[in-house]
Amino acid sequence: MCGIVGFIGKRQAAPILLDGLSKLEYRGYDSAGLAVRDGEELAQVVKAKGRLSNLIEKTDGGKALKGTCGIGHTRWATHGEPSQTNAHPHVSGNCTRSGSGTVESEVVGVHNGIIENYTELKEKLLKHGYTFYSQTDTEVVIKLVDYYYKKYNLGPIDAIAKTMVRVRGSYALELMFRDYPGEIWVARKDSPMIIGIADGETYVASDVPAILKYTRNVYYIGNLEFARLVPGEAHFYDLNGDEIEKQTTEIKWDAEAAEKGGFEHFMMKEIHEQPKAVQDTLNSVIKDGAIDLSSVEITEDEIKNFEQIYIVACGSAWHVGMAAQYVLEDIVDIPVRVELASEFRYRKMPLNQKALVIVVSQSGETADTLAALRLAKEKGIITMAIVNVVGSSIAREADKVFYTLAGPEISVATTKAYSAQLAAMYCLAVQFAKVRGKITEEQYSYYISELLTLPEKMQKALEDKERIQWFAAKYANSHDVFFVGRGIDYAVGLEGSLKLKEISYIHSEAYAAGELKHGTISLIEQGTLVIGVLTQNELYEKTISNMLECKSRGAYLMGLTTYGKYEIEDQVNFTVYVPKMDEHFIGSLAVIPLQLLGYYVSVAKGLDVDKPRNLAKSVTVE
Ligand code: F6R
């Protein structure tokens, strides 16, 4: 949701904090703020509503704030409207209405996450004489730390531990105590946070890109752990206040990969990185013409014994599950259920104990997906994560991990992570089918050789950009768009529809083509755009006939099919082709023109492609 950064070292903190925040702006962009301390001096707090550029301007690129120790925040509002007052940092004592200025408070802090019991805690603190300036849950947690700090007078370790025991919810919390200059204190539960160390300096961030330029050596702070940070060192504690030993991990991501590299937007860059993301993901398990899942740590015996697969995820990752279910059911011949994580976690459904639960997540921090994973583990079911971010909560907690090698994904709308997740699913499907004796050696080799053609064919699918750009400009003012398809094509339509609506703000829906006439077709009027995905030969006639029903009611038809199916030209108004390949895997090609369509419509409307309104990259709250 929000992004946090911290720095303590020899250099001026503010420019480093602002630079880190610029890499995290995808996590929240309705306001931002910094608190910086110069030695024993009191902290200076500056906040600004709106994009980070406002804060940069207000602080003269950071030059207005002196000091080598500081914390920063970019906000995506959950409690309280986007405003300067609600922006972080928040302080424990009295402050100006806007919260900016020199701070005499005992504690100043920033927070990413949600404190669920903040109302109850606020009431308690009000009774103890605290005044609240913002509507945020964060101000409550900062004041609670202050309350314990003063009440027991036992120092930050005790105050933070007591606060962590008392609050419910999720947090990545950064604090500075007036009496402890040159120190930053951090605490974490269910919200991402990493701590980087280099050359006698220490960094904190919600995500890797913010610190990659400075260091690759990071500590992962565990759930319900907290730490004291001083220049070049981090000391970790558990809830009892006992020190915990930790080792740093080296991040392999390339700093270049987190920059725009000549593209106008991260989304376009990431669309173009898909062939590589898929290739790298395939190469991580395909060796000498066979799939080797040893890195995932799943055994052949386990694969043979599964009676059911549940795929659990949110948003686009759920769409990956929707597409993968058709592949798994067809070639592995195993029952598959695809569940929205937010539903799965509260549903009281009987779960097959001999199942495999596959959770899919780019960030590895999505709150609902993480909760679904924990639920499955609690029930004693084997879990596997298909995840992109190394060391993320989901990666750490799942029994088995299949890493997608998509690299850092910055644009809020996912593209390359989606494609890499799908590639991972295909590998699982083919290997499961082989191990369970559902396909012959010849079929196995055929599927693998087809998979290996994917990157090149994705590259080809990217070549038709200009026509899609032209078409996008023509339909940029649409009010409603419908995507239809059957089977895998339906799943691709779901993703195409989400891409369009989330970045272009055009209402769109995806339908299983046969369902249209059960109600939705009444929405079709003169000029309504209906996009049909038609890559599955067996289902082509059926879907085309559903599309023609719309055309006869005034719809304008776009057909997305494979080269060679040229008869479509007589049936629809505009056609887009993708290369032919085995139909199980073709969704990976068909999605590309739809990603491009969403992108170009957003650009044509002059919208902020990479940071669509109301959205954040990593959804660490329910
Ligand atoms: C849409 C999008 C979201 C994510 C969803 C899950 O473009 O990116 O729908 O797919 O929020 O996020 P992860 O994969 O991080 O669990």
Image (cartoon, rainbow, N blue to C red):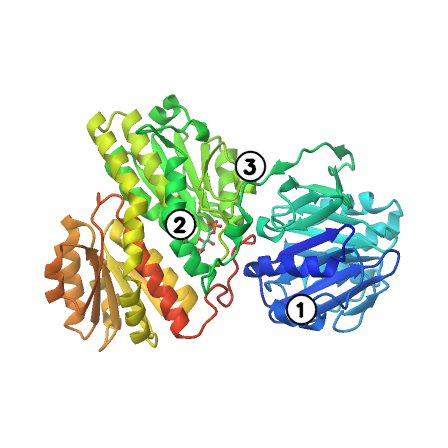
Residue situated in front as seen by the camera: 542 or 443: 443
Q: Is residue 245 left or right of residue 618?
A: right
Q: Above or below — where is 402 with respect to 86?
A: above
The numbered mark, 2 or 1, whose residue comes first in the sequence reads 1
Q: Quadrant of residue 279?
A: top left
Q: Quadrant of the N terminus?
A: bottom right
Q: How many marks?
A: 3
Q: Is residue 259 left or right of residue 460?
A: right
Residue 407 screen position, x and y as percent: 48, 47
Mark 2 neighbour class, 10 Å CA radius: few under 14, some 14 to 19, many 20 or more: many
Residue at image point 70% right, 61% down: 15
What residue is shown with label 3?
A: 396
Kind of residue indicated by mark 1: Ile
Residue 594 screen position, x and y as percent: 32, 60
Secondary structure at numbered mark 1: helix
Kind of residue indicated by mark 3: Arg
Mark 1 neighbour class, 10 Å CA radius: few under 14, some 14 to 19, many 20 or more: many
Q: Is residue 400 left or right of residue 471?
A: right
Secondary structure at numbered mark 2: helix
Residue 136 screen position, x and y as percent: 68, 63
State yes or no: Cβ of the residue under disc 2 lies below 8 Å from any atom of ligand 1: yes
Residue situated in front as seen by the camera: 28 or 453: 453
What residue is shown with label 2?
A: 418
State yes or no: Cβ of the residue under disc 1 lies below 8 Å from any atom of ligand 1: no
Q: Above or below — where is 503 with respect to 401?
A: below
What residue is shown with label 1?
A: 56
